Image (cartoon, grey):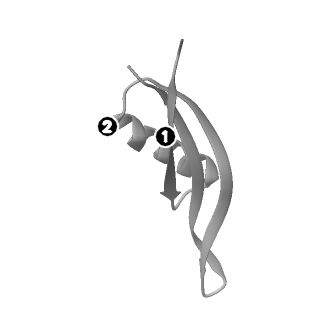
Amino acid sequence: MTVYKVINVVGESKKDFSDAVNNAINEAMKTINNVRYAEIERFTTKIENGEIVSYRAEAKISFEVE
């Protein structure tokens, strides 16, 4: 039987939402083994002086427990 643990992460990028998602997943994989799934829950932007300055992606990362 396979068991998974789920954590919440937030990735940020000055480029776009896709880059923010990749940053969230890649940073999680630096310290977590066996990452299997990512569920993207929410996208947000930071706006300053009427311009988007950063993109954020909130995700749930699932990894297999050894």
Please tell me how many numbered marks the rendered image carries.
2
Q: Is residue 54 left or right of residue 31?
A: right
Give the quarter of the image for residue 34.
Answer: top left
What residue is shown at x 51% (from left), y 55% (from top)?
10
Q: Position of residue 28 (x, y in %)?
A: 41, 41
Q: Is residue 64 left or right of residue 45?
A: left
Kind of residue indicated by mark 1: Ile
What residue is shown at x 63% (from left), y 68% (from top)?
45
Q: Name the quarter where the C terminus is drawn.
A: top left
Determine which of the numbered discs, if any, sits on residue 25 in the image.
1
> Which of the two discs, 1 and 2, labels the residue nearer the N terminus?
1
Kind of residue indicated by mark 2: Thr
Label 2, residues with CA under 10 Å away: few <14, some 14-19, many ≥20: few
Q: Secondary structure at mark 1?
A: helix
- 30 over 18 or under it: above or below: above
Determine which of the numbered discs, if any, sits on residue 5 in the image.
none
Determine which of the numbered discs, if any, sits on residue 31 in the image.
2
Q: Is residue 24 left or right of residue 59?
A: left
